[in-house]
Amino acid sequence: MGEVVRTVVFMMALISCNALLDLSGVHEVKGTWMGSTTLPCTYRPSDDFTQETLIWSMERDDSTSTVFRRDNSGDHILLSKFRDRVSVPKHSPGDASLLIKKLEIPDSGHYTCQVIWRSKNNSLIKKEVTTTVKVVKVAATKPVIRASEPGLTFAPGARTSLTCVASGSPPISYRWFRSGPGGEALLLSSQAKLAWDSLQPSDTGTYFCEAENRVGARAVQQSDAVELTVRGPPQAAPPPHLYALPAALGVAALGALAAALLRRRRRKAVDLLNNVCFFSHSTADDTRLEADVEVPDSCLLKETNSKTETPSDSFPMQDNGYDNIRITKNPDYENLVNAMESEY
C-alpha cells in the first residue's frame, strides 16, 4: 500500500513538473524579407528547476546547425551568417524566444528551441519545440499619413509635420507631393516625414505621399490626400519702442546728409565766384557783397574814378551802411547765377 502511494506521488510530481516546464511556441512564422521576426519559446519558471542550457538550431536542406547556445559560459552565436542578427532575452525568466533581424531568403527553415533544466536533486529535464520559418518578399502597402498634431488646421507660425507610413519589405522609399492647378503634383521631399518649422498661409493646400520598395514590379502605392489649412489672426505688430532706435538713426542720417550737401554747395559757390568779380566801387574802401557766402578778397576791387562809371543798370545798396556802394549787373554773372540755381 505504501509503495502504491509513493508511486502516485511521484507520478503527480512528474505531471506537475511537465506542466511547469512545458515549452510554448508556434508551428509556423512568416517573416518579411529584410524585416524582423520573433520565434516564440516560453515556459513557466519554477523554483525547483534551474535553466541549464538553451539551444536554438536550424534545419535546412537536410542539415542541422546550431544557431545560438546559452550556458554557464554565456551566449554564443555559432553561425557566422547570423552574427549580429539574432538575440534571446537575458533578464526575462521563462522567455527563450529567438529574435532574428534583417531576414534573408536563406533564413527560411525549421528552427528548434531546446531547453535543459537541472532540478535540486541534479536530475536533468529536456524539452523542445519546433517552428517553421518562411521568409517572403512583400510589396509595399498603401501608405497612410500620420500628423504630429491632432487636426490639420493651424494658425500662422505653428510647427507641425506629416509622416508617410507603409508596410512591406524594406527598404521602402517615400516621396511627398503637393497638388497643383490642373492636377499637377509638385514634388516636395524624398523622405518619410514632411515638416514645417513655421507654417504660413501659403502652405495651405492638398498633400499626399507615395511608397515603393524593390519587390516584384515595384508598384508605387499612393496615399489618400489630406487638406492642410493655415488660417488665423495676423501676427501682432512689434512694440512701438522697437521702431524708436531706427527712426532716430534715420533722422540723424538725414541731418548729416543735408549738412554735407550744404557744405558742398558752399564750396562750389566759392569756387565759381573766385573766377568772377562783379563789384563796382565809388571809393577806395574795400567793400563786400552781403550774401550767403563770403566773397573772396580777390573779388574786392578799388574804383579808380567814380566819374567814369556807367550809371545804367546800377542801384544804391542801403542795408549794410555803405550808402555809396553800387552794384553793376554783369551778363556773365547773371548766366552764372542761373546755372547755379538750375543745379540746386
Image (cartoon, rainbow, N blue to C red):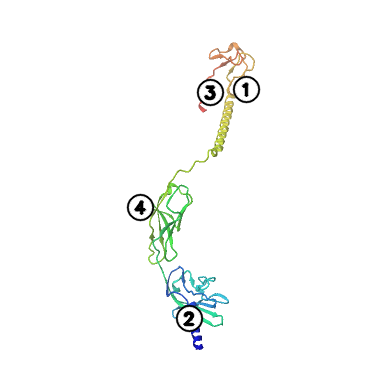
Residue for badge 4: 183
**Callout 4, which amino acid?**
Gly
* Label 2 Cα crowd, 10 Å radius (few <14 / some 14-19 / many 20+): few
Q: CA distance from mark 3 to mark 1?
A: 19 Å
**Callout 2, which amino acid?**
Ile
* Label 4 Cα crowd, 10 Å radius (few <14 / some 14-19 / many 20+): few
* Label 1 Cα crowd, 10 Å radius (few <14 / some 14-19 / many 20+): few
Q: Position of residue 161 (x, y in %)?
A: 46, 54
Residue for badge 2: 15
Residue for badge 3: 337
Q: Are marks 1 and 2 in contact (CB under 8 Å)?
A: no
Q: Nearer the viewer, mark 2 or mark 4?
A: 2
Q: Secondary structure at mark 4?
A: helix
Q: Are marks 3 and 2 in contact (CB under 8 Å)?
A: no
Q: Earlier in the sequence, mark 4 or mark 1?
A: 4
Q: Nearer the viewer, mark 1 or mark 2?
A: 2
**Callout 1, which amino acid?**
Ser
Residues 151 and 123: in front is: 123
Residues 175 and 296: in front is: 175
Q: Are marks 2 and 4 in contact (CB under 8 Å)?
A: no
Q: Earlier in the sequence, mark 2 or mark 4?
A: 2
Q: Earlier in the sequence, mark 3 or mark 1?
A: 1
Residue for badge 1: 298
Q: CA distance from mark 1 to mark 2?
A: 135 Å
Q: Position of residue 204 (x, y in %)?
A: 41, 49
